[in-house]
Image (cartoon, rainbow, N blue to C red):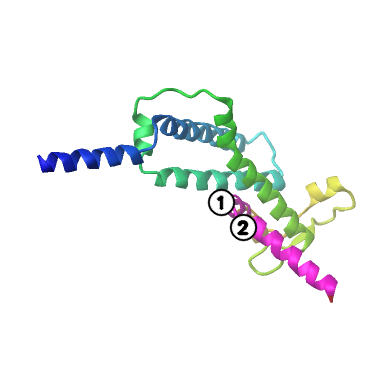
Amino acid sequence: MAVSKQKSAADLAARNNAPPKALLEAYRQVLLCVFIATLFIIVLLAISVIKISLLPTVILAGALGAFFSSLMRLYRYEDLPKALVGDGPRLHSFYLVIYSLVPMLIGAIAAAVLYVAFASGYIKGTLFPEFDCYKDLTCDAFKDFVQNYGPKPPDGFAKVLVWGFLSGFSERLVPDLLLKITKSTEAKDRS
């Protein structure tokens, strides 16, 4: 009798700590939306007829970094397999789709900001790409900046893509770098 009371108390405690089915279904739908969005991005990159310049590629690398981070968070969620194969009510809400795309949007914005920080010369060092106007081209207008100004090849391309991915993967990377730049600029202004 005492064993059955202990077992039922443990079952009750486990049920109280278990996430509701609606939450599990939300995780299932978020995973599905993020997966479909990533497949769409990969297909866009795989189509060789579309010529994509470096800046949009870096932005996509940031989005993929954020997607990878989101997948890792979902993968660590213990009850995710139950959510993926279990029965439950379907949540067909627009907010869920938007919620699943927010990390990738933040990753894309962070990658673009980091790219501009590299291009401006605010962030320098051996781990960071050096930017220059490509040979025999001018960089006098914004259009030229986007098309003709970029990292020095070949390692600069790889560095900017890696940093783009990292900026999407690490949610605090770009905000922390911006805070550092702001503090150093303020310190220079005071002296």
Which mark identifies residue 111?
A: none
- How far across and down, in percent of the image, does residue 41 sit? 59, 36
Query: Could you say which quadrant of the image residue 118 lies in?
Result: bottom right
Helix, strand or loop at mark 1: helix
Instruction: Please report contact status of discs 1 and 2: CB closer than 8 Å, yes or no.
Output: yes
Q: Specify whether residue 167 is in view.
A: yes
138 lies left or right of 179: right
Q: Disc count in the image? A: 2
Residue at the spot x=35%, y=41% of the render? 17
Q: What residue sits 79% from the left and 67% below the top?
A: 185
| Marking on residue 173 | 2
Front residue of this view, candidates 138 and 161:
161
Circle 1: is it few (<14), some (14-19), or many (20+) Cα within 10 Å? many
**The N terminus, quarter of image:** top left
| Amino acid type indicated by mark 1 | Phe
Question: Which corner quadrant holds the C terminus?
Answer: bottom right
Q: Which residues are magenta?
A: 164-190
Q: Is residue 123 visible?
A: no
